[in-house]
Image (tube, coloured by chain):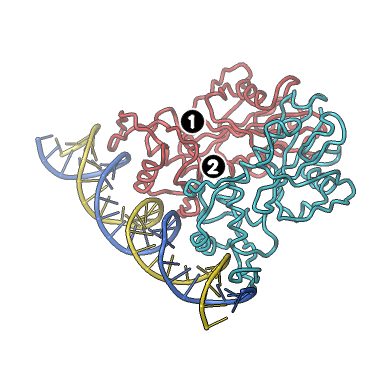
Chain colours: A cyan, B red, C yellow, D blue
Amino acid sequence: MSLTVDLVVLTVRDDRLHVLLIERGKEPFRGKTALPGGFVRSREDSDAAALRELAEETGLDGRTLHLEQLRSYTRPDRDPRGRVVSVAYLALAPDLPLPVAGTDARRARWTPVADLGPGDLAFDHARILADGLERARAKLEYTTLATAFCPPTFTITELRRVYEVVWGVSLDARNFHRKVVNADDFLVATGTRRVPDVGRPAALYRAGGATVLYPPMLRAAAQHPVART
Amino acid sequence: MSLTVDLVVLTVRDDRLHVLLIERGKEPFRGKTALPGGFVRSREDSDAAALRELAEETGLDGRTLHLEQLRSYTRPDRDPRGRVVSVAYLALAPDLPLPVAGTDARRARWTPVADLGPGDLAFDHARILADGLERARAKLEYTTLATAFCPPTFTITELRRVYEVVWGVSLDARNFHRKVVNADDFLVATGTRRVPDVGRPAALYRAGGATVLYPPMLRAAAQHPVART
DNA sequence: TACCCTTTCGTCATCTTGACGATAAGGCGA
DNA sequence: TCGCCTTATCGTCAAGATGACGAAAGGGTA
């Protein structure tokens, strides 16, 4: 029996939710699109393997990202090579340029989640991706994790776009502003501002110390589904 | 490399939170207290193994309980026998009598969680238990999972005790009553009532169809820590 | 200076919540 | 039967949170 890790790495890019995918270089599913990942080595735990694979396959540094274990997939027939148990991880990243010329960054690329069809991914990776998306969506509600999609300093509008894109809804800018500013230790004003091409300059914030979001942002209330192409 | 499942089975008993523990019958940690669990068989996935072990070791039927995957533990040194990866499961049960004379129910017993000291459990089971407790506590907030601790029909006071015992707080009976009755499809009145030894009879409810709890029950607001001995 | 655009502040009615008073509905003892 | 004890349920009220939306602020640019 062998153990692998699979990574669901999400980011928000051009107002769309993207997932990091690779093209498989060997069998099985050679040439097919899949989640990045690989085998856990003998003296490694799965956390370490996730960090290593993230660096090797995508050039991203998991220590600077949000990285958490998602769940494990153990169906005996999930890999044609035999019994392969996979521990899936969820990573959330700001819109970083991928170091394309990295050591082993074989064709890693950001793909809009909405562009993926049912059979586009190898193995049971469609299911893993779906579970990762649901975890991310749920955690935006009651944790401060949305800031993991943002660069070190960001505007409230950028933060709102994260919610809108991940949830696929549209939120009132004024109420959102009031809410996140009042939430306990969610945001810390940096005192600086960013002057955009057009419109009023926006104040820049850093993530505050809170990990749980209080009061929470409830999806149930946000009932403004928006067309996502 | 081998694969095991470990089970965190929780219940509320005598107004205290209990976990189901067994005494290990063989090495390593022979005679020591541990979470129930065992090896996943070759043509089984971990869900099936969790159901099987639950039945074998405790006589409980996981199909009638809430049973969900918690997370996996992969540290190479977590088992002295070598590399053993464990997929942990969380089960929530009403206060059922254990079929003590079951096939293999070797000394399975309910133990108050608060009675456990730091080194009382074998392997990394203290950590697994802690993760299971935190998951259960968190899920009471924004899901209807509290009903999984209750029998098929129950009173609102019984449901409140679940929250109080799992969170270790004390909740105002009147506000709790108002809240759960108003929550969307959380409770369904059965029309029957239970006459207690003392006090006014209480209406009996069944769990409603909702899985998410809206509006949620927030712990942050419940700031009445109560002495738990 | 007059716009345009986005951010930020205000207002208001509605809903939710915490604190807690009051009543209802059983059993029990006098 | 009448109080009384206990617990369940309903009500009230002020404070806080929320949704809808108006209005001002603060940059560019024509």
Q: Which mark is residue A215?
A: none
**Residue B33 visible within the image:** no
Q: Report in which chain the residue with disc 1 lies.
A: B
What amino acid is labelled 2 in the image? Lys
Question: Image height check: is A100 above or below A6?
Answer: below
* Mark 1 vs 2: CB contact within 8 A: no
Q: What residue appears at the point 58 percent right and 52 percent down from the top-left corner? A: A164
Q: What residue appears at the point 30 percent right and 29 percent down from the top-left corner? A: B191
Q: What residue appears at the point 83 percent right and 49 percent down from the top-left corner? A: A55
Q: Secondary structure at mark 2?
A: helix
- The residue where tag 1 is placed is B94
| Label 1 vs 2, first from the N-terminus | 1
Give A213 or A19, whichever is nearer the viewer: A19
Give B80 or D21, whichever is nearer the viewer: D21
x, y percent for residue A198: 62, 68
Q: Secondary structure at mark 1?
A: loop
Q: What residue appears at the point 45 percent right and 32 percent down from the top-left corner? A: B209
Question: Image height check: is C8 above or below B176?
Answer: below
Badge 2 density bin: few <14, some 14–19, many ≥20, Cα 10 Å: some
Q: Are marks 1 and 2 on the same chain?
A: yes
What amino acid is labelled 1 in the image? Pro
- The residue where tag 2 is placed is B139
Question: Image height check: is B183 above or below A79?
Answer: below
